[in-house]
Image (tube, rainbow, N blue to C red):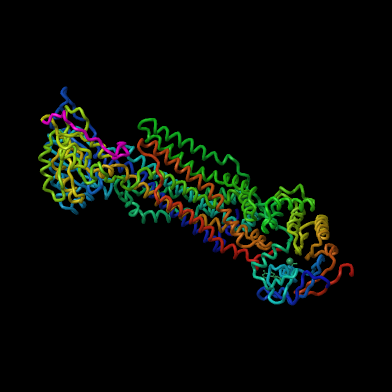
């Protein structure tokens, strides 16, 4: 290749710069997101390792022949621990109760001093929360604050966690307590696997529009300088040399874009770290990639850009004589659907494996991601074929000139026409996956007050063997906003099932059809879970006439409140401080909070953010593609106008050319997206199932369509201008 | 003239500093085939563009089939072209993405014909121009002469009042040119369509009823072909 020819090709004025600027912008945005996502992907397991100490890992108490717990003697080379399940103002937080002997030899995480009974550590975010409310509402639950938990023990800055010291003999009575010799140092892989899958899918989701952008801009470049390219070919460059040159040009542009992306990533990392994953925001280090990984991403993207451009140049070669005759694309065959089919098979296979083989999520996450990636790329690969099939059907039926022209174009150039909308189609696929996934648990509480149900502001405490129900009831009695307390009993000899209450107490907690006096057995479970789970809207209440009042064992303490946060949290704090259980008292609302709602909200926030970026890149690609299509067909459109085709019909033609591939493939990607989400949910858990997506999904869909419409309408004014009869020459 | 279908008077048209037409008066009779000749750059194409309502002249008036074109808006002129005018150019006027029959059907569809009628009529026209076997081919797969005959079929299919042809055989060798021209003139004469035909070739012009010569934006002569 001669230098003169290279210059002619590479330095060709303003349009080239505009085009390259588009590449740099798109690639920079994509690279920045990829780097952040990769950082998160690589650090997620490590992040779970930091909080491994929160997970007790040892042996539960043994029981003797008479079903009594065998006490565990205090020992210096072991510790007792139990997970604290607690909540404040509707938000759960992590906690571990710990008992060690004063002369303990157990190594503490991050080498902190072991907390003695009545002392506790809390994370900085937790300390902030504790300080923001009266101690009687939160701080008093665990005694005296020793200091903050170090960062090495936390997921991130907003992680709320406590480590509370408890007396050995007391903790030994908690049924959830285990004895262990050391703290865990590695988190369960499963904790980060779901998030890693999501993050990887996000990165792939960004890759698709980025590759498409590069490919579209390369095509536009080739269209713009058909003549130049032909000249260079005439000078003596071979087809391969041309591909290499185009590849080099794009390598430089995408390398520049990737480097800008590294800068953007550095700038947005503090912001990205604010995203909550698994209950906490992240540290900047958690979303930072090592220099080596950064180099891999940058070079990888440059290589991807170069490869895409070179391949396009090789494929679209103008030949030494230039393109005098418009050539149709090589026919697209049904083979184009093979990637999609392979992706579906691999994806379905790995979800099935995760579902049916226990503990296989860690192994199968990789084929799962691969299958997902193949589906995402497969939709894009199959798009032209689907476009062509549709255009054939359209061409045979339409009776409008616009329809015939559009069908002709779609049928002969299915790749080019589909490429314009492919980014959006891929984006819609991804957003459908996430919308489907995050639909599993709606963010809104579905717990409501109803007759016969426990009031939503009543606290339920499960009492331990050693708890003094009467003393606890008296302790909460004087709290402002507490309207009463009722003790429920377990009766060893009652024949009716349920928690035994005095009739007056049963009425007070909201039971209906209660006999006038005496002891009654109440189906407390049904009163708490609601008709959907219990199957009845009249929870059972029965006379417990055969219960022996002297043999009753206290099992529940119910505290009725006025629903104010002060009353609920003060009562909860009073009970947590006294009762011997790892389960804090909770209302029906709190119990629901403990579900996966938070996790899903986090996932969907991430998904919609990524989606926004993918749509933005796709919009860039779509407008570039529309302009390219316009340029390419100036003469065609000019001829149509000359022959008397109204501008309105020309616009219909352009709109049809974009709308047809968009409509059919958008539908396909939405359906596939939901199917994928459904499969993942099925494989992850029994009690997650697909629901109707929330409004954000429809908003994202509407945004995609609006972006598409804007891209199309944007070319409308260009149609009139660029086919102006004064400016087109017909000979 | 007994029954002029085109009446143009005092036509001028400039492109910036270039005066392409400098005052042209022309009448064309219904059913007449007129050849327009003249050197390159003399204004022939500009003239027929003005006569066809593609360009609006700077001054002067053009009436075609009783309609005063200069009084019409651009959109109304587009409508008029669609209904009354056919065009044939030197090459590259067929839509590359459509088959021959679709190309011919296009103006019919634009005018509101039903798909099936449009197809039927298009096939008839292709048949008349000896192209029945090319109907399903796309322009890229045809010879230059075949493509030109498809273009002629397309210009004639909507049964326009006037067909304007700008060097329709200019890109063909002399044998093919002769074939295309006779094919066109046969059907034109049969249907009584008026034709205004630009050509550089005297042999082509010899097929016309009359020839006019344009020089520097002015008509420098007009003569019945036989009179020379
Ligand atoms: N759209 C335009 N913009 C600027 N100048 C134009 C335009 N169209 C025509 N001209 C100029 O007007 C003059 C007449 O052009 P026209 O195309 O009518 O010539 P012609 O007789 O058809 O020539 P040829 O035989 O080479 O086709 C020429 O000088 C040409 O450069
Ligand atoms: Mg000309």
| x and y, in percent, of residue A261 in the image | 42, 54
Percent position of residue B160, x then y: 75, 62
* Magenta-drawn stretch contains A536: yes
Identify the residue at the far top of this view: A65
Foreground of the two, A508 or A207: A508
Q: Is residue A76 visible?
A: no
Residue drawn at the location 16% of the way across and 30% of the way down: A545
Front residue of A139/A469: it is A469
Magenta range is A530-549
Q: Is residue A489 visible?
A: yes
- Specify whether A365 is left or right of A445: right
In the image, residue A157 sits, relative to residue A499, either above or below, namely: below
Q: In this view, does A499 lie above or below A618?
A: above
Query: Is B201 contained in the magenta span?
Result: no
Q: Give A414 or A392, whichever is nearer the viewer.
A: A392
Find residue B70 and report its image quarter: bottom right
Q: In this view, does A399 lie to the left or right of A453?
A: right
């Amino acid at each position: 290749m001669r230098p003169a020819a290279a210059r002619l090709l590479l330095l060709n004025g303003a349009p080239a710069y505009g085009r390259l600027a588009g590449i740099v912008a798109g690639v920079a945005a994509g690279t920045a997101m990829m780097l952040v996502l990769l950082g998160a992907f690589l650090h997620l397991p490590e992040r779970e390792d930091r909080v491994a100490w929160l997970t007790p890992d040892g042996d539960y108490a043994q029981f003797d022949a008479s079903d009594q717990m065998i006490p565990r003697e205090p020992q210096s080379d072991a510790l007792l621990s139990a997970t604290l399940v607690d909540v404040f103002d509707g938000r759960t937080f992590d906690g571990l109760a710990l008992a060690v002997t004063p002369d303990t030899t157990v190594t503490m995480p991050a080498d902190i001093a072991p907390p003695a009974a009545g002392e506790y550590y809390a994370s900085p975010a937790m300390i902030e929360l504790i300080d923001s409310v009266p101690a009687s509402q939160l701080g008093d639950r665990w005694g005296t604050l020793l200091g903050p938990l170090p960062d090495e023990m936390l997921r991130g800055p907003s992680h709320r966690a406590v480590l509370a010291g408890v007396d050995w003999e007391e903790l030994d009575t908690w049924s959830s307590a285990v004895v262990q010799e050391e703290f865990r140092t590695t988190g369960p892989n499963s904790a980060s696997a779901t998030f890693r899958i999501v993050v990887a899918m996000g990165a792939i989701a960004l890759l698709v529009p980025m590759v498409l952008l590069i490919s579209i801009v390369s095509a536009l470049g080739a269209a713009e300088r058909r003549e130049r390219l032909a000249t260079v070919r005439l000078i003596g460059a071979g087809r391969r040399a041309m591909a290499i040159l185009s590849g080099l040009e794009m390598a430089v542009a995408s390398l520049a874009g990737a480097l800008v992306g590294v800068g953007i990533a550095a700038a947005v990392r503090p912001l990205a770290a604010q995203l909550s994953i698994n209950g906490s925001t992240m540290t900047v280090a958690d979303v930072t990639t090592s220099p080596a990984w950064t180099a891999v991403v940058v070079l990888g993207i440059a290589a991807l850009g170069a490869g895409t451009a070179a391949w396009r140049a090789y494929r679209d070669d103008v030949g030494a004589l230039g393109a005098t005759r418009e050539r149709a694309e090589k026919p697209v065959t049904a083979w184009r659907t093979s990637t999609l089919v392979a992706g579906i098979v691999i994806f379905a296979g790995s979800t099935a494996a995760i579902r049916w083989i226990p503990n296989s999520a860690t192994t199968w996450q990789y084929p799962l991601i691969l299958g997902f990636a193949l589906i995402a790329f497969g939709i894009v690969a199959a798009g032209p074929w689907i476009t062509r099939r549709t255009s054939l059907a359209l061409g045979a039926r339409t009776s409008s000139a616009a329809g015939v022209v559009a069908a002709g174009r779609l049928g002969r150039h299915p790749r080019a026409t589909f490429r314009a909308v492919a980014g959006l189609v891929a984006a819609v696929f991804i957003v459908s996956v996430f919308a489907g996934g995050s639909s599993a648990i709606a963010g809104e509480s579905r717990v409501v007050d109803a007759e016969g149900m426990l009031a939503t502001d009543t606290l339920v405490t499960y009492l331990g063997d050693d708890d003094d129900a009467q003393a606890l009831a008296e302790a909460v009695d004087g709290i402002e906003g507490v309207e009463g307390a009722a003790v429920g009993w377990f009766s060893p000899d009652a024949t009716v099932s349920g928690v035994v209450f005095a009739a007056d107490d049963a009425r007070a907690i909201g039971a209906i059809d209660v006999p006038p006096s005496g002891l009654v057995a109440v189906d407390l479970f049904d009163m708490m879970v609601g008709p959907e789970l219990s199957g009845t809207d009249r929870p059972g209440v029965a006379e417990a006439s055969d219960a022996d009042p002297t043999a009753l064992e206290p099992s529940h303490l119910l505290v009725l409140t006025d629903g104010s946060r002060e009353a609920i949290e003060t009562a909860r704090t009073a009970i947590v401080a006294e009762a011997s259980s790892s389960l804090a008292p909770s209302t029906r609302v709190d119990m629901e909070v403990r579900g996966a709602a938070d996790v899903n909200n986090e996932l969907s926030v991430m998904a919609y953010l990524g989606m926004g970026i993918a749509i933005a890149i796709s919009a860039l690609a779509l407008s570039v593609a529309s302009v390219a299509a316009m340029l390419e067909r100036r003469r065609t459109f000019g001829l149509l106008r000359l022959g008397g085709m109204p501008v309105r019909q020309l616009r219909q033609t352009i709109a049809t050319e974009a709308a047809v591939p968009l409509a059919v493939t958008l539908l396909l990607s939405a359906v596939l997206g939901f199917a994928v989400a459904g499969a993942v949910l099925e494989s992850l858990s029994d009690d997650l199932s697909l629901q109707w997506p929330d409004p954000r999904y429809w908003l994202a869909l509407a945004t995609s369509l609006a972006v598409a419409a804007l891209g199309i309408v944007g070319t409308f004014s260009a149609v009139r201008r660029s086919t102006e009869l004064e400016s087109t020459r017909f000979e | 003239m007994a029954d002029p279908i085109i009446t143009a008077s005092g036509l001028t048209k400039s492109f910036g500093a270039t005066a392409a037409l400098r005052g042209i008066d022309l009448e064309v009779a219904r059913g007449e085939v007129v050849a327009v000749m003249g050197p390159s750059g003399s204004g022939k194409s500009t003239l027929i563009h003005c006569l066809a309502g593609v360009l609006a002249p700077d001054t002067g008036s053009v009436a075609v089939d009783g309609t005063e074109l200069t009084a019409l808006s651009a959109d109304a002129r587009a409508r008029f072209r669609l209904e009354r005018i056919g065009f044939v150019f030197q090459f590259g006027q067929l839509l590359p993405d459509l088959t021959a029959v679709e190309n011919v059907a296009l103006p019919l569809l634009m005018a509101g014909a039903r798909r099936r009628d449009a197809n039927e009529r298009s096939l008839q026209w292709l048949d008349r121009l000896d192209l029945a076997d090319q109907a399903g081919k796309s322009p890229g797969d045809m010879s230059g002469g075949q493509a030109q005959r498809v273009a002629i079929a397309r210009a004639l299919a909507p049964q326009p009042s006037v067909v304007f042809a700008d060097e329709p055989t200019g890109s063909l060798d002399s044998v093919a040119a002769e074939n295309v021209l006779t094919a066109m003139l046969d059907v034109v004469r049969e249907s009584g369509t008026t034709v205004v035909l630009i050509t550089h070739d005297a042999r082509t012009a010899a097929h016309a009823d009359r020839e006019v010569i344009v020089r520097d934006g002015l008509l420098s002569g007009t003569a019945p072909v036989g009179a020379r």
